[in-house]
Amino acid sequence: MKNSHLFPLLTLAKKGKVKGSVYISSKDFGKELGVSQQTASRWLKELESFGAIQRELVRGGQTITITEQGKNYLKTLFVDMCGLFNKKNDELVIDGAIVSGIGEGKYYVTRPFYKKQFEDVLGFSPYPGTLNIKLTDETDILLTKFLDRYPSVNLKSGIDEGRSFGHVRCYKALIDGRVEGAVIIPLRTHHPPNVIEIISPKNLKEALKKKDGDLVRITIEV
Amino acid sequence: MKNSHLFPLLTLAKKGKVKGSVYISSKDFGKELGVSQQTASRWLKELESFGAIQRELVRGGQTITITEQGKNYLKTLFVDMCGLFNKKNDELVIDGAIVSGIGEGKYYVTRPFYKKQFEDVLGFSPYPGTLNIKLTDETDILLTKFLDRYPSVNLKSGIDEGRSFGHVRCYKALIDGRVEGAVIIPLRTHHPPNVIEIISPKNLKEALKKKDGDLVRITIEV
DNA sequence: ATTACTATTCTACGAGTAT
DNA sequence: TATACTCGTAGAATAGTAA
């Protein structure tokens, strides 16, 4: 994906409202972008080869759909620009469903190397276990990217127990509006981008009286 | 301003957080963007000649500030992208201060050509006078650009009383959360972009018990 | 050290045209 | 009609270097 492809992709996105496909000929598309039919055709082919769009040649033109990858490219740019223009929000609300982890969180939270730091930076001793939240809404996945923009409290990296521990970013949060906790983001995350990890001084499932699949709301002060 | 200048400008904006200046050498800037020192230097010179940035050569590099024009370029793009990604908001809140108009609004609102249409599309007969609101916050000025994205009710253009009347877009609004009204945007506006015009069935200054300089909040359902 | 000029290389555009 | 190929050329990127 080259920089020169941004405007063609953006134009397609506007025409198709991100979702949905656009029917257009390379001639008309070129006219819209102020380039020749040949260049428009080449750009579309290139966008396709980069995986940003899917094309189908039909009589009179082509039907173009922006792929997930293409959307992500635009989203990344959008998040960047949001960071530039958004005034500081008071809070960030993220909704998601509880999913079961593989116990990895428990291992890390109970390592003395991290445990001590959690107590220092968050002011509480975390319950030995983490709550994994799968974000439901596309927008919420976007919001987690926003987090990068905001100041976090951080756990230092280092070596202990004969192994290395990486950086961890923490954002104090309120779970379901009532239970204290924090979103923790390991620098080398082992989660897919739509899952975030929560710790709390309490056993969150118990405190919230919730089980896997139930929805929770995470409120982060930023 | 060419498309190829977007990324350099965006990079500068990110480094300087839109406001504030950036100190960097063309060599480092080129490295950051993946181009040669010479190209980075040329781009900076070009951005300067387009009026998007101001530069000052200092020992060890240059101090770069994004101009108002440069910011506007990025804003336009941002607003475009907001239109793509924002889920439909429930309401748009705009804050501003009352400023005195020159009576022009009163003239237009009382023209039979518009008056009848106002009654048709808004469901009320406007008080003979408009309230001019000067937006205080940069973000609010941005919001008014958002309005273009949302469906409006419109007054048709036409000829009456021997003169021509232009298109007018209207957005029903609630003033200070309690008084019914509408934001009106003439297609050929006579206002600077940070001033919007409000009409209402009531005399707004009286109904709100406010005078010039007082703050009002406009809530538009979108 | 820088910035930025000049010369050269090379990429990208568009005219002509095949499919 | 479309899309998209070839290819001559314009303009952009870089190397070398001056200031």
Image (cartoon, coloured by chain):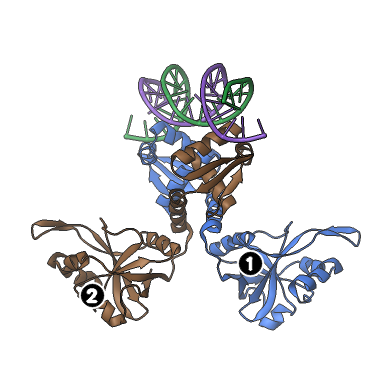
Chain colours: A brown, B blue, C green, D purple
- Say which of B190 and D9 sits in front: D9
Mark yes or no: residue B47 visible.
no
Mark 1 vs mark 2: give the one in front.
2
**Residue at mark 2: chain:** A
In the rendered image, the quadrant that contains the N terminus of chain B is top right
**Residue at mark 1: chain:** B
Secondary structure of residue under mark 2: loop
Residue A222, labelled with which disc?
A: none
Quarter of the image holding residue B187? bottom right
Q: Where is mark 2, residue-wise?
A: A123
Residue located 53% across and 55% down the image: A19
In the image as oriented, which residue stretches furthest toward the left?
A: A162
Q: Position of residue A64 (x, y in %)?
A: 54, 45
Residue located 39% across and 46% down the image: B23
For this view, does A129 lie left or right of residue A17?
Answer: left
Mark yes or no: residue A68 visible.
yes
Q: Position of residue A18 (x, y in %)?
A: 53, 54
Badge 1: residue crowd in 10 Å (few <14, some 14–19, many ≥20): many
A201 to A156, vertically: above or below:
below
Secondary structure of residue under mark 1: strand
Residue located 43% across and 40% down the image: A50
For this view, does C9 lie left or right of residue A210?
Answer: right
Which three-letter amino acid code belongs to the residue tagged 1?
Lys
Q: Where is mark 1, residue-wise?
A: B134
Residue located 47% across and 54% down the image: A78
Quarter of the image holding residue A187? bottom left
Q: Position of residue B126 (x, y in %)?
A: 77, 75
Which three-letter amino acid code belongs to the residue tagged 2?
Gly
